[in-house]
Image (cartoon, helix red, strand yellow):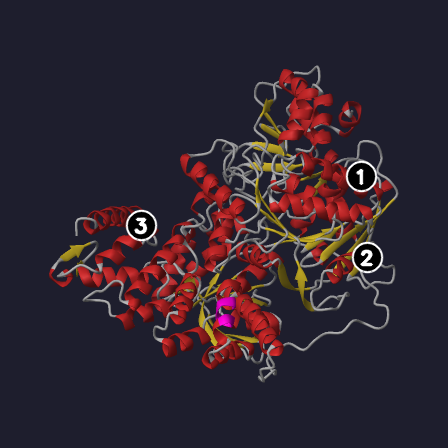
Amino acid sequence: MEKLLPVLEAYKVKAIERKKNYGLDPRPLSKEEVEAIIEGLTLDNLSEENFVIFEEESLDKLLLRLISQEVRRGTFPSSYAKAEGLAKFVKGELSSDYLSKEDALELLDNMQGGAASVELVTLLEEGYYTEEILNILKDTVLVNPSEFNRLVALAEDNEAVKDVIKSWAEREFAQDWKLADKYQGLSIKVGNNITTGHLSPSKNADSRTDHPLHAQFIMDGREDEADFMDRLKKLKEKNDNIFFVAGSALGEGSSRKSATYTMLQVLGKPVDGEPEKKAGGVVVAKSMAPIFKISLMASAILPVICDTDSINEGDSLELDIENSKLIVNGEEELDVKLPIPFQLDKIAAGGMTYFDAGNELQKWAVKYCLDNDIDFDQSKVPAPVEKEEERVPQTLAQKIVGMNRLDGKDTILAGETAEVKIRGVFSQDTTGPMTLEEYQLMAGGDFGAEFVVQSLCHTGECPSTEDRNRHKFIDEFVTKRGGVCLETGEGIIHTIGNRFVLPTDVIVGGDSHTRTPTGVSFPAASDIIAGAMKYGKQTMTMDESVRVIFKGQPKEGITARDLVSTLVVYADKTVGKDVYTGRIIEMEGVEFLDADERYILTNAVAERSASAGTVPSDEVTIEAIKKNLDYLKSRPDAQKSPSVKDTIKAMEEYLANPVLLKGDEDADYAATIEIPLDEVNEPLVAKPHHPDNVAPLSEIAGIELDEVFIGSCVGGDLESIRAAARIVEGYKIPHEVNFVVCPASRDIYNELAQDGSLAKLTAAGATITMPGCGLCMGNKRRIGAGSTALTTTTRNYQSRIGPADSQTYLGSAHVAAMAAILGKFPTVEEYFDMFK
């Protein structure tokens, strides 16, 4: 009791403080708290002692409630502590008057694998509750290779264990994975262009792994939805089932998983035995950003596309899955577009964690049965695919994805679903903590991907104590499993991560700007990133492609950043800019751009809500890879990090026999857009509050500025900052302009210091900051109320980097440097006079 009561008292203090400050239940138990509770259950006379947290409970009931309801599933340290403790009760190594052996085994069953699988297999090996454990394992999918191999060893002389493996091969665990025929609820209606930043505000990024708390910030910065939570509360008083109904472009912006977590907290129902977690929900919109839609499905939220104009808040809705209809108030029937069958199966499984684990477990089991001539029902085994006998015209993206297929086929067309090798994974520090939590939820061990690069670029500048603690945890977690964790100030995830990528690679990353200029890359939410880390592969459905052909060369003074805006201008002139949504933008005719400039282009497909962007590889690419190889070999971890060593080897092999891919002329594209560069006669700028709100410089010339920022992954490159330094040399920045420059990496910073560029900038009045993301996300650095800013960052959504009444423009480093000098946007004549 002497050990137990101080732990409970400390838990009580935290619980009361959280309830007082936020109105929320306590956070999940820590490893130390679990260990104290396990030990506490062995004490006598617990039923005679009472303890009060929010209400009075006997100690025995309190401890049993905490151990059964307040510990995370998966492979968190607390999960292992719970599983190990319960196993000791099952074995009789610990005894309790309040927890029987059978009850302890039931609690292990309720953990649904992960840490519990380790203990269940051990119990089986040692002969405890054999029949019961075999039945538990039949329904368990979160089993790692080490436990599977131990079961294979047991199966050599145990037919019952063989039956478990056979049941996995026959997919018995999935027999209850079914969707309801119909879903009913009331609508809560929101407007157009609800971004992930409105669902999960950047300035509250430090609370993202605390799902209930973070959900309280929903719609912060979106003034027309400021009363969202009050409206939701009133609707839930009438009906606890709520449909989230939106206009167009729902979920555009960042790939942050926390936006989906917020949807779960708003729409879902509590999950028994898993603290803070909620499940389920229906989201309806006229259109959705592809990353957000995929993230919803990965978390078993059902995304529905239909015309929502006629739906009002409070309407009674019924979704008929079989007939693809949404019935409004029992009268109006709307046609809806549902996910494809493969995606519906994932939702039915409860999301990707169990779906992917089940698929992988089935593969192991099928191989075991085939290798050992065990007869089993193969009707649930996916049919094998065969290579196409005739030539199949392919786009560039299709060629790259096709050559990475793992099912024996080497081509892929739009709409095909296939398992694909993911050679590398990018992770950053505001989505990374969510990714690492998801990794533990899915019981991940060492990384299965060939390389994992983790950055500390979003929170490295001016970190709090909590940030630094988080940095240490991330570094240790990633490095221990074979990945690379960059130091604070070492560089932005894209700037450094791009140096690991080959033209034949498929990459995924936990940041929406994972848009590598070589290979093809797909940004995704944290659970999908964790899955790619764990398995080194991913099942994906190939999107259509849009072909963009740049004709000619840009005039002097027209930069890669201006070419970004032409994607919008010329789509609007022809097929409409919505053509990019959910498709891959394949850009050609940019041989004149260097590797950094090509990334400025591929990066920008994020703001078009495209799923990916590509540029054909050429001699410029080869030279960039040689430079990247030198960089990797110079890293201090080149000889000890598996991610670095494996990538050095892969690059050397590639350079020995380079493959330069390009799309076939007769490939099928959703649209082709030509951009005649000789028509672009002046710089282009994005006006508030959207990157697609493009205007020529002449339209906004003379608008005064308070803030100018040059930096980010597409503005902090070496040549952009060098150009800015050349332009400001000899000038003084007006006192009323806050001019900040942030190099994208430490080695860029060092080169700028060596060539004198930083001295030119600081002499003019610029502030040079630590390499990193700087102002781009708005979580650390922000602008003032009512301010007007020009930045070289990626997005200018309302409230992203400042209060709702601030205004943000986006443009090139050249325009930004001139604007800093003048205190306003230059005229076209001033721009070309000052261009250097």
The three-letter code of the residue at mark 1 reads Glu
Question: Comparing marks 3 and 1, which lies closer to the viewer?
Answer: 3
Magenta segment, principal secondary structure?
helix
Counting from the top left corner in percent of width and height, residue 444 is at 50, 57
Tag 2: residue type? Thr
Using the numbered discs, state the Cα–Cα distance from disc 1 to disc 2 in whole angstroms: 29 Å
Q: Nearer the viewer, residue 588 or 158?
A: 158
Query: Which residue is pictured at 80% across the width and 45% down the height?
Result: 655
Task: Name the residue carrying label 1.
Answer: 623
Label number found at residue 672: 2
Foreground pick, 408 / 189: 408
Considering the numbered disc 1 on the image, is that residue within a helix, a strand or a loop? helix
- Whole-percent x, y for residue 676 in the image: 85, 45
Which is nearer the eye, 297 or 658? 658
Q: Which residue is mark 3?
A: 32
Q: Residue at x 65, y 25 (%)?
A: 750
Residue density around tag 2, few if under 14, some if 14–19, many if 20 or more, within 10 Å: some
User: Which mark is first along the chain, 1 or 3?
Assistant: 3
**In terms of sequence position, does the residue under pointer 3 or pointer 2 come before the other?**
3
Question: Does the magenta run of residues contain 633?
Answer: no
